[in-house]
């Protein structure tokens, strides 16, 4: 793909991003195109690659005087995308638990546990942007039931 260059500070350079003044406001240019051989061809993209940060750890538990068998839920985990192109979609996966919001940026993990049972595992979230680019993140979770009955 041909590269896009701009004359910056007395030399031709490849810009990291571009902006144009439209209607009194600066707008980000997300791509550059050129008309060649009867069609438009993309020559540059200024969209940062999709990346994802995820809450590293969540937990939830039951303590006395709860019943011996107890349903417990973690606090909420959050996936925060940057770069890419909105809107974003999410797909959480985890073993041995119910995922409260498997297609949202915020979710929690729930399980019904017996007395002195615990689950410590890792959930994975895949974020997909409007262009089909993906980023993957992980969150450790810990669920416990310490009901001593």
Image: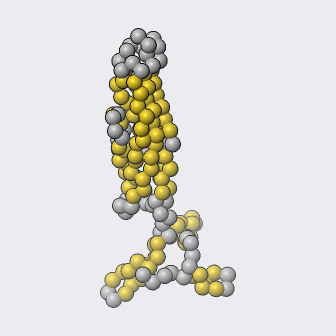
Give residue 1's position: percent from left, percent from top: 42, 81
Q: Residue at x 49, y 46 (%)?
A: 54
Q: Is residue 98 left or right of residue 147?
A: left
Q: Which of the pair 7/103 is nearer the observer?
A: 103
Quarter of the figure with the C terminus: top left
Q: As displayed, is residue 80 above or below residue 101?
A: below
Q: As displayed, is residue 119 above or below residue 24?
A: above
Q: Residue at x 45, y 46 (%)?
A: 138
Q: As displayed, is residue 148 above or below residue 137?
A: above
Residue pushed farthest front?
Answer: 116
Give residue 127's position: percent from left, percent from top: 40, 52
Q: Residue at x 38, y 55 (%)?
A: 128
Q: Which of the pair 26/44 is nearer the observer?
A: 44
Q: Quadrant of residue 118?
A: top left
Asked if residue 76 can be seen in this view, the reply is no
Q: Quadrant of residue 144?
A: top left
Residue pushed farthest bottom?
Answer: 37
Asked if residue 38 can be seen in this view, the reply is yes
């Amino acid at each position: 793909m041909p590269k896009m260059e701009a004359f910056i500070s007395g030399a031709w350079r490849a810009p990291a991003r571009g902006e144009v003044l439209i209607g009194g406001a600066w707008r980000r240019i997300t791509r550059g195109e050129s008309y060649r051989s009867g069609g438009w061809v993309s020559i540059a993209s200024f969209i940062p690659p999709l990346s994802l940060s995820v809450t590293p750890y969540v937990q939830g538990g039951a303590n006395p005087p709860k019943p011996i068998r107890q349903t417990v839920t973690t606090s909420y985990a959050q996936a925060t995308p940057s770069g890419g192109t909105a809107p974003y979609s999410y797909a959480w996966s985890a073993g041995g638990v119910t995922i409260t919001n498997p297609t949202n940026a915020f979710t929690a993990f729930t399980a019904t546990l017996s007395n002195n049972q615990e689950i410590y595992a890792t959930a994975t979230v895949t974020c997909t942007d409007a262009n089909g680019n993906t980023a993957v993140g992980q969150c450790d979770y810990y669920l416990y039931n310490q009901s001593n009955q």
